[in-house]
Amino acid sequence: MTETNFTYHRINNEEAIQKLDNQYVDLASASLGATVISCSDEFFAEARNLLKPGNAKREIGRYTENGAWMDGWETRRHNPLKFDWVIIKLGFAGHITGFDIDTSHFNGNQAPAAIVNACYSPNGDPDGETKWEEILPKVNLNATSHHYFGVPKTKSTYTHVKLSIYPDGGVARLRVYGIVRAIWPADPSAPVDLAFVGNEGRAVACSDQHYGIKDNLLLPGRGIDMGEGWETKRSREPNHNDWVIIKLGHPGYLETAEIDTAHFKGNYPKEVKLDGCFSESEIPGDDAEWVEILGLAKLGPHKQHLFKLSVLEKFSHVKMTIYPDGGVMRLRIIGRRELPNINILHPVTIHNHISIHTTNNQFNPRIIVAEKLTQYAYAAYGEVIQAFTEPHHTSSTSISITNGIKVTPANQGTARKYNHIARVINFRQTLYSDSEGKSIAKAEPNLSVFHCKPATKLPFEVKLLERHSYSSQAFIPMAKQNVSGYLVIVCLNGNDDRPDLSTLKAFTASRTQGISYNPGVWHHPMIALEETTDFVCLTHESGVSIDDCEEVFLKEENVIQVEVNGFSGSEQLKRKTEDAD
């Protein structure tokens, strides 16, 4: 059913604007993973600027080869069509409650009018058959202004929005305010991050957010710098503390907290404590009964801190208090919406007495099947490095957005350039000390070649996992024509700072695909199939072995087997194995 909505209203007073900002999430923020899928034109300024979390900037006198530099989306003049458009995939599906169409610094070149449509397309990007629903009808826009609009909370949820501007021009930012619709595990006793913004968690109050806003605490990832965390101003009073209150996405029984001080090296809080309460209110009142769930604990610089929580009660809110002040990048609160009827956790022991917790129904039997490597299936572990098929109407001189990647012409029109295909991350750009006073050495880029012998036995046995806590690591194959691909095995980190084997996955990558591991992602060393294969590798290393690469060995009874069915060459390997036997 189409949900055409013309009952919008302009918001002009500061109180209503604050309410929009404080009570709802910007579903179109790049911080939440929102991306530009496609646009009609971005000659003067890129459409992805619309999604930047910060305010638009102006740099007078700065020019690009096409004109004045603008921090926003700007199309060329004299559009032969009625309007220009951009399609945005929201960070999370959600109900829409309002917009801010911001034309800051666009004066004389702003878009005169705009319309916003939305659609629900959870299984892929919109196409010609997609039904769009008008959420905000045609509205007039002024120069260098915020334009706030409220709409009744939509009954439907949406995954994409389409901003159309008439006839052309520029917009600095687009905010799509709304309520995230969480997709919960079918099992209510499954552990999840109840504070995560994607699970409807929200930061509802704080004592101070002088440098970085409280909402950043609940975002995905670990941020790229201090600006993507929550930071309070310096305190000058004795016994000072700062605090933030989180309304959990769902009340639950809380087990573990992760407090991440990534990028905060000289301005992290000295200590922290956590309290919980149960309240029906958005912000608990003065009469709320707060219960200590984590006593005063020390924090260190640029580090993920994991804490077991002490009280097995159901809470709706968590209050984090930091002493005396400082910055925190992320807060994760792992809990269960309901307690399990039975004890489903079962420890799997590996060498050096590390205990990895998995669930019986997720992990047994210990055989997994490798799946084809795709950008979406691999997203939780890192990035896929490859070229993608562009829309059929794309010319060699045009700019397009394909799979969220900006593609531009290069080499005088003889090549297509896929920009920012994978992030290159180095958390050790300077020397610093951790919470125990241990020096963490500065790391430098290391571009190398791995000469990898092929696996000699299938199914492949996973006996070892490794990770690089402070750096991404990229591998790009330089394979011969008769090599079809290689095997990639990855695993996320668990609450106990060890591999969470329930998240272990295997992928078959083609010889035209490279991969990049995110920092801290556990993985098996590179696995060539069929023949010896060379890989170009880019990572950052300091020469301190334990900082550069950490390894975990599994005991023999806990080895995981990986089937590579359907992969060319797998039968050859099996025959080699049988002949060897």
Image (tube, rainbow, N blue to C red):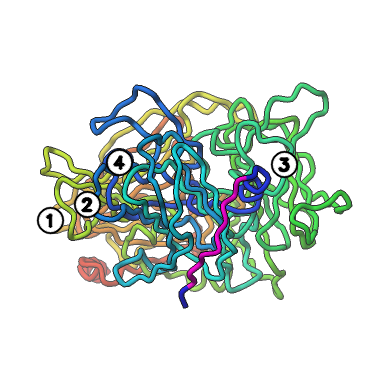
Rate crowding at label 3 as few (under 14), some (14 to 19) or many (20 or more) other CA atoms within 10 Å.
Answer: some
How far across and how far down the image is residue 158, in percent?
48, 65
Q: Secondary structure at mark 4?
A: strand
Q: On the rendered structure, is 285 left or right of 165?
A: right
Residue under label 4, please give it.
537
Quarter occupied by residue 142: top left
Amino acid type, callout 3? Cys
Q: Which circle's residue, 4 or 2, is located before the other in the chain?
A: 2
Residue under label 3, please give it.
206
* Residue sitting at x 68%, y 63%: 250
Rate crowding at label 4 as few (under 14), some (14 to 19) or many (20 or more) other CA atoms within 10 Å.
Answer: some
Q: Which mark is residue 80?
A: 2
How far across and how far down the image is residue 190, in percent?
62, 67
Q: Secondary structure at mark 3?
A: strand
Residue under label 1, please give it.
481
Marks 4/2: CA–CA distance: 47 Å
Q: Which circle's residue, 3 or 4, is located before the other in the chain?
A: 3
Q: Which circle's residue, 2 or 1, is located before the other in the chain?
A: 2
Marks 4/1: CA–CA distance: 20 Å
Q: Secondary structure at mark 1?
A: loop
Quarter occupied by residue 206: top right
Give yes or no for residue 234 being in the magenta stretch.
Answer: no
- Which residues, given as a range, are shown in magenta? 3-12
Viewer-closest of 158 and 190: 158
Amino acid type, callout 1? Gln
How far across and how far down the image is residue 115, in percent?
42, 57
Where 526 falls versus 126 (above or below)?
above
Rate crowding at label 2 as few (under 14), some (14 to 19) or many (20 or more) other CA atoms within 10 Å.
Answer: few
Viewer-closest of 68 and 257: 68
Q: Are marks 4 and 1 in contact (CB under 8 Å)?
A: no
Q: Which circle's residue, 2 or 3, is located before the other in the chain?
A: 2
